Image: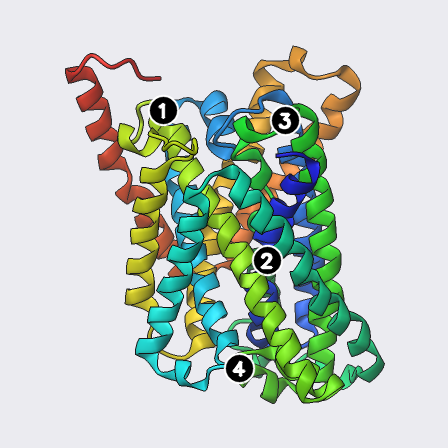
Amino acid sequence: MGFWTCSALVVGNMIGSGVFLLPSALAAFGGLSLFGWLISSAGAVILALTFARLSRLNPSAGGPYAYTRDGFGAFAGYLCAWTYWKAAWIGNAAISVTLVGYLQVFFPALRDPTLAIGTAIAAIWLCTLINLRGIGAFGVVQNILTALKLVPLLLIGILGWFSFHPEYLRIPPVEDLPGGGGYATAIATTAALTLWSFIGLESATVPAEHVKDPKRTIPRATIFGTVVAAAVYILSITAVQGVLPPDVLMRSTAPFADAAQVLLGPWGYYFVAGGAVIACLGALNGWVLLQGQIPMATARDGLLPESLAKVNKHNVPAHGLLVSGVLVTLLVLIDGQGDLVEVFNVIILLGTMTGVVPYAFCTAALLQFLAVKPEAFKPRERGLLVAIGSLGFVYSMWALYGTGQQAIFWGFLVLMAGIPLYTWRQWRNRVHGVATL
């Protein structure tokens, strides 16, 4: 993969379910969501700079896992990989739910829960089959879908400002904020919700062995993709919030399509809904790639079952893709019931929590490298990198707080549930005389 395919992976993995259903999730917070966007955008740029520098230091397959492993050892690396892997398939459950929400525009019968769940699962396995065909097939599909998804977003993002109602973005009274708490808690929550849109900024670091000139390509694609996504998000989502009244927006399962109908009439409604379907497919396709790549690097080091590292004739980790596909399917079956926006909010807060934990590991790893391997960095950049790593770690911890007690509770259980598997692998490797880290 070259610069443009890596950039398409980064942009495609970020611009998906988050942007197309997030206006509904943010509607209850009104103008407070703008503070959340500013914080999450600034934090995302800091994290992108972190991954850009780490990828130049060590362009290894596995991305966050490899950086954490090299910084803190095998066990920390395993916990990072375990959590990041869960973030990938939890995120894919959210993307598939959003995909169904926009397909309902064309097929109202999908409002039936059984049909909706079946369609979400079919989308997951369609993208799994594409990825099983190899990086070449993935790259072609990803480049096309990423280019197509930007068209409706930019269209609404520009036209929406000509029909913008500032009063729709007023700051609500504190007693009307969802979940209780004050404005500080609400801003933290909106920052966590909007951060979901940036989960994936590190995507180009994961399949490093498939990237041309990774030390140069990955950092450029990571920073470029993050900046592009941030600009598109703020332009388009704020426009939607200014076009639709908050009470209407909160109930919408296709907010961009509803805004397009106001701006352009019926044809705009269907045009943007189609663009949202394409965007979700692009994001799903990109994250399915990572579902196989994340456990592959860990399995190669003997920390997960070796079958997850096996590749097929197209040089892709087929077993990892298939196992991950089954796990996403089970999550959709379990959580696919109920109101679409409510399901989306629960899944993305849990997905954000499990996605931010690797960010905390990696920002700390950058500081660790600066402390124990200062010779690997130019003297004039060390002070700046200390600031970037410190701010990135503080931001990651604050974002974890913003995901809320429920997400942290379940996310912590997900994290701890992986420890017995690590212990079993260490025992099995010792019994069979397999070298481990």
Of marks 2 and 3, which one's residue comes earlier in the chain? Answer: 2
Q: Quadrant of the N terminus?
A: top right
The quarter holding residue 214 reads top right
Of marks 1 and 3, which one's residue comes earlier in the chain? Answer: 3
How many discs appear? 4
Q: Nearer the viewer, residue 204 or 38?
A: 204
What is the x, y in percent for residue 242?
74, 80
The quarter holding residue 80 reads top left
Alpha carbon of mark 2 to alpha carbon of mark 3: how far?
A: 25 Å
Of marks 1 and 2, which one's residue comes earlier in the chain? Answer: 2
Alpha carbon of mark 1 to alpha carbon of mark 3: how far?
A: 20 Å
Instruction: Locate residue 167 relative to residue 301 in the image: left or right.
Output: right
Q: Please report the residue visible at 61 percent of the width from the left and 56 percent of the height from the top.
A: 145
Alpha carbon of mark 4 to alpha carbon of mark 3: how far?
A: 41 Å
- Residue 197: which numbered mark, if any? 2
Alpha carbon of mark 4 to alpha carbon of mark 2: how far?
A: 23 Å
Q: Nearer the viewer, residue 222 or 398?
A: 222
Give the foreground label among 4 and 2. Answer: 4
